[in-house]
């Protein structure tokens, strides 16, 4: 029926958009969204009072969610073919709905289904996170790390999550791991990514060893893929550009990927860039670059002549 006559679907979606606009126009919601936009520009949560209230005061987040669901329940009751116009996903017992995105900020509604959740690894990213638990109950742990990024120490703090709990995390060094959800856990979550995010890191929960790291931003991730593609294509003429990327970029993960591909394409150009990074004590990649240089010199002694020619002391 809908393929032959799309008018009912269009009418239903018009009603859904009207519902969200009515919600956004409410006085408290409008003030919150104005603060949300400032937060997305990099403002601290403390400088956004309407937004801060949702993640610090009792019942404010619950009232916001009740208002949202009220508008959409009425709209869906009158228009059963409609669906809320929010991006959403479901994966392994976790549902997410993106309520808003502005600059570096995201506002997300998340639900975790009842059950036990076990993770052998834990991930940390360069962002701030604020949680307001709306409903349900769960056993969880706050995991904090300390020490050098390649081998960290960990401490864990057990916590009970239930309606009214408010939490804030610097996710570069701390995060929350849900272990047992007793009744469906519903959380309103606010995220603010760093202006120049460091790579995300995944660690073994048992040993603290670094297992994997990835670019902290989508743009850097795309450039990593481009660097890897140039390497796989054997584009030797791209080696100087990859060396420049390894020396000049902010994103460490992108720099390291570019350096690896440069070394594979042109040993002389890549080794010169590696030496320059290794000899800069202020470079955060200096230590791993020095370790790689030593490893390469041990395996390929002929590289010493390149070091003498291209990396004079």
Image (spheres, rainbow, N blue to C red):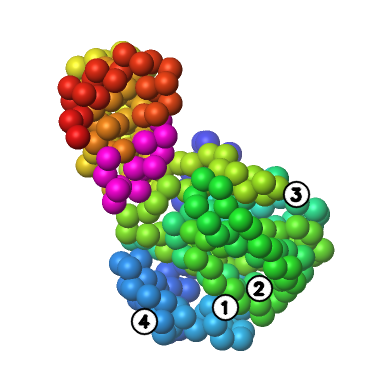
Asked if the residue at tag 1 contacts the one at tag 2, i.e. Cβ–Cβ closer than 8 Å, the answer is yes
Magenta extent: 279-292
Query: Gap in Å between the C-alphas at discs 1 and 3?
Result: 29 Å
In percent of width and height, residue 283 lies at 30, 47
- Badge 3 marks a residue whose secondary structure is loop
Query: Gap in Å between the C-alphas at discs 4 and 2?
Result: 24 Å
Residue 286 on the magenta span: yes
- Badge 4 marks a residue whose secondary structure is helix
Per the rendering, the mark at residue 225 is none
Query: Gap in Å between the C-alphas at discs 2 and 1?
Result: 7 Å
Q: Is residue 145 above or below residue 188?
A: above
**Badge nearest the viewer, 4 or 3:** 3
In percent of width and height, residue 184 lies at 75, 62
**Badge nearest the viewer, 1 or 3:** 3
Q: Which residue is mark 2?
A: 134
For the residue carrying disc 1, how many other residues have a C-alpha within 10 Å: few (<14), some (14-19), or many (20+)? many
Mark 4 vs 3, N-terminal side: 4
Q: Which residue is mark 3?
A: 118
**Which residue is drawn at the image coordinates 18% and 25% (left, top)?**
310
**Badge nearest the viewer, 3 or 2:** 3
Quadrant of image for the N terminus = top right
Mark 4 vs 2, N-terminal side: 4
Query: Gap in Å between the C-alphas at discs 1 and 4?
Result: 18 Å
Mark 1 vs 3, N-terminal side: 1
In percent of width and height, residue 284 lies at 35, 48
Asked if the residue at tag 3 contacts the one at tag 1, i.e. Cβ–Cβ closer than 8 Å, the answer is no
Q: Which residue is mark 1?
A: 61
In percent of width and height, residue 146 lies at 55, 60
Query: Gap in Å between the C-alphas at discs 4 and 3?
Result: 37 Å
Q: Is residue 134 above or below residue 245?
A: below
């Amino acid at each position: 029926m809908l393929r032959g006559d799309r008018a009912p679907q269009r009418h239903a979606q018009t009603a859904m958009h009207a519902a969200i606009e009515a919600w956004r126009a409410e006085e408290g919601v409008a003030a919150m969204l104005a603060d949300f936009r400032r937060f997305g520009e990099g403002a601290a949560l403390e400088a956004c009072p309407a937004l801060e209230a949702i993640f610090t005061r009792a019942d404010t987040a619950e009232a916001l969610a009740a208002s949202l669901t009220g508008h959409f329940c009425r709209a869906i009751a009158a228009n059963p073919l409609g669906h809320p116009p929010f991006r959403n996903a479901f994966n392994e017992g976790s549902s997410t709905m993106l309520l808003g995105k502005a600059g570096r900020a995201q506002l997300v509604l998340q639900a975790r289904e009842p059950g036990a959740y076990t993770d052998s690894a834990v991930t940390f990213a360069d962002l701030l996170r604020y949680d307001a638990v709306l409903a349900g109950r769960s056993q969880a742990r706050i995991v904090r790390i300390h020490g050098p990024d390649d081998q960290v120490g960990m401490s864990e703090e057990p916590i009970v999550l239930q309606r009214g709990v408010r939490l804030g995390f610097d996710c570069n060094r701390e995060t929350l791991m849900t272990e047992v959800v007793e009744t469906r856990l519903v959380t309103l979550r606010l995220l603010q990514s760093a202006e120049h995010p460091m790579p995300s890191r995944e660690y073994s929960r048992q040993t603290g060893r670094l297992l994997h790291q990835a670019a902290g931003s989508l743009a850097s991730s795309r450039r990593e893929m481009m660097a890897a593609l140039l390497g796989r294509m054997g584009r030797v003429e791209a080696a100087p550009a990859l060396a420049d990327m390894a020396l000049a970029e902010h994103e460490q993960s992108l720099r390291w990927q570019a350096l690896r591909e440069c070394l594979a394409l042109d040993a002389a150009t890549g080794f010169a860039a590696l030496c320059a990074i290794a000899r800069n004590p202020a470079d955060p990649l200096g230590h791993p670059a020095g370790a790689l240089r030593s490893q390469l010199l041990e395996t390929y002694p002929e590289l010493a002549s390149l070091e003498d020619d291209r990396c004079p002391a």
